[in-house]
Image (cartoon, rainbow, N blue to C red):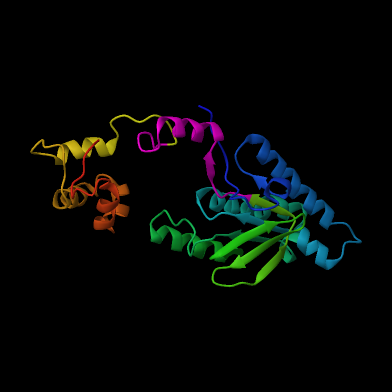
Amino acid sequence: SVGSENNTFNTPGIEEHAHFLKEVLDARRIRSAISDAFESAMTPTQTPAKRKRLLHFVVVGGGPTGVEFAAELADLVREDLQIYFPRLVANDVKIALIEALDHILSMRDKQISDYTERHFHRENIDVLMNTFVKEVKQHEVVVQLKGSDELKSIPCSVVVWATGIKPRALTNKLREIIGFDIQSNRMGLTYRSIFTLLFEEADTERRGTLDLQQFRALVERKITEFPQLEIISKSIEKAFEEADKDKSGTLTLA
């Protein structure tokens, strides 16, 4: 496996000023940066404004990785750093989680998302939703609210970029050579996927095709066993139309 790489969405300053969460070395660098921030904030000559910046930590990405890191960082501050820096923890530490969508953990059940947001509120973790990161600078993050043209700067000392991964250039090149329609899975070569098996089960007449009615019945029958079908169930007609490549009104395995 050639693995994957961090997805920066071509945002300026990420590679230079943000930390990723992908390898053990990344975790060590983040831990070191957080420790340095606390030690620098303890300097007697430090101004209040700079102290607050040093103790403001920003996590970008409201998926499972970003959410878990924000929670673990809050635990680290409350359970460990509180012992050594009680005054700083009580007065100056801030953790912000930035998410471009209107909910964190948007791929999970809404109850889980709502519970997590309430929990973060109790933990004093600022959740900034509908917020896009436009640039990461050495001492600040530049953001833009959805629907607004105004840019806002958030002073901080540590930025953790947890917005997901993307295929390496080699993977995309291989997919291009093989053909995107033939091999669309970025994880590996696929053969007889779950959808292939479900298709064969639904095709009771062995015609090699499924019409919209059969497709709808299949999704409704199997949604409990395969929860990932819930996404399709919310827009059956649209999903069917997108899968019907030749516009024949039927789906095939070809």
Of residues 129 and 165, the one nearer the viewer is: 165
Of residues 147 and 153, the one nearer the viewer is: 147
Note whether 58 is above or below 7 in the view shown.
below
Q: Which residue is painted at 84% across and 54% down in the image?
A: 40
Horizontally, is 166 left or right of 47 in the view? left
User: Residue 150 location, x and y as percent?
Assistant: 64, 72
**How many marks can you see?**
0
For residue 76, say whether it is visible: no
For residue 28, say whether it is visible: yes
Note whether 180 is above or below 91 in the view shown.
above
Q: Quadrant of the C terminus?
A: top left
Q: Which residue is painted at 55% across and 35% down in the image?
A: 169
Indicate yes or no whether the magenta region holds residue 129. no
User: Residue 146 location, x and y as percent?
Assistant: 55, 68
Horizontally, is 168 left or right of 110 in the view? right
User: Residue 81 location, x and y as percent?
Assistant: 72, 52
Of residues 249 and 154, the one nearer the viewer is: 249
Q: Which residue is painted at 59% across and 60% down in the image?
A: 98
The residue furthest right is 45
Horizontally, is 211 left or right of 174 in the view? left
User: Residue 27 location, x and y as percent?
Assistant: 66, 40
Q: Which residue is painted at 73% across and 53% down in the image?
A: 83
Note whether 144 is above or below 32 in the view shown.
below
The residue furthest left is 205
Of residues 4 and 208, the one nearer the viewer is: 208
- Tell me which segment is drawn in magenta: 161-185
